Image: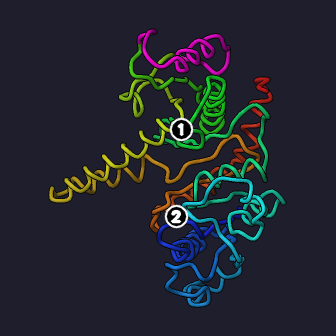
Amino acid sequence: MIRVAIDAMGGDLGPCIAFECANNLLSKYSDIEIQLYYHESFPCNTQSSKQHLTQFSKDALKRLTLIECSDYYRVDEELDRSLFKRKEASLYQALISMKQGKSDVVVTCGNTGVMVALARYLLGLIRPKLYPALMRELSVKPLRCLVDLGANVHCPASMLCGFAELGSAYVEEMSGEKAKVGLLNVGVEASKGSNIVRQVDILLSLREWPEYVGYAEGHELFSGDKNVIVCDGMVGNAVLKASEGLLHFLMGKAAKMEGSNQVLESFYQNEQRHGACLVGVRGNLVKSHGNSDVPAMMGAVEYGIDIARTQLSKKIEARLMREEIK
């Protein structure tokens, strides 16, 4: 039985999205249990928890646990140590459940910075010198990923090398394929890029693992032989949101063309996971968009279920140990 802890707070649409998502998933999967961490008085909450529960089947209710929390982190929270003292906050409680072995994966739509800080503080790092990073699958078959997506904005060369190691461990453990790392840059010539990017290029070239195949340009994000694309969090977040914005723009334009919109929607559903995985901490953690609707939230939770089934965090840690990564 896979135990999923959902932080119902932090999303733009309120905890009602998490309740509906939980209902749908408990009906779809018979081998999952869901813990919902929520705050009853959220401004966008149009129904009470009791009203939401009337929509659940008897079987679903047996596998649902509600945890009402007296606090939650807002989207505009300042990142300081006071966050760690708010032990009754919904995300704090969800992460504690995983730390205590009561859940297998945590999914949240909340503040990214808060999530990363709390995960480091409560769960710990799988390697003391590796910073955790947000990673997104750009395609499933073949598996390719982009790392980092915003967990770290200011990245020295050593941190970017760590992203290459985490992303490579993810790809090789999830797909069985050999990772081939590309460093996102403005060109492939040796003289291109910032000083830090050129330093990373040299450092990765000296390593036996992971296999580094050079700079990657923007057009190689979705095709080509490089299946782990590395960049700092600011660049990665901009790339991700620009790509999603372009897709939504094209879907809007194609809506008036018979059949075209359905093709794009099918591609979007089949080729991309919903949500990003935080790699590098001792636990499975998925971050969904703050503006996630029910389908997007369901996709993020299903992604979480998949990585929990494969025990992703433990496999990445074991792989890094085999490669003697400190």
Residue depicted at 45% across the width and 18% down the height: 193
Side of 247 where 111 appears, left or right: right
The answer to whether residue 137 is visible is yes
Inspect the image, locate mark 1, and give the three-letter code of the amino acid beneath it.
Answer: Gly
Q: Which labelled disc corresponds to residue 298?
A: 2
Quadrant containing the N terminus in the rendered view: bottom right
Inspect the image, locate mark 2, and give the three-letter code of the amino acid beneath it.
Answer: Met
Q: Which labelled disc corresponds to residue 252?
A: none
Q: Magenta stretch: residue 205 in it?
A: yes
Note whether 34 is above or below 309 in the view shown: below
Q: Nearer the viewer, residue 27 or 246?
A: 246
Which residue ends up furthest to the left in the rendered image? Answer: 257
The percent position of residue 272, horizontal first and vertical second, equals 45, 48
Helix, strand or loop at disc 2? Answer: helix
The percent position of residue 126, horizontal first and vertical second, equals 77, 39
Magenta range: 189-212
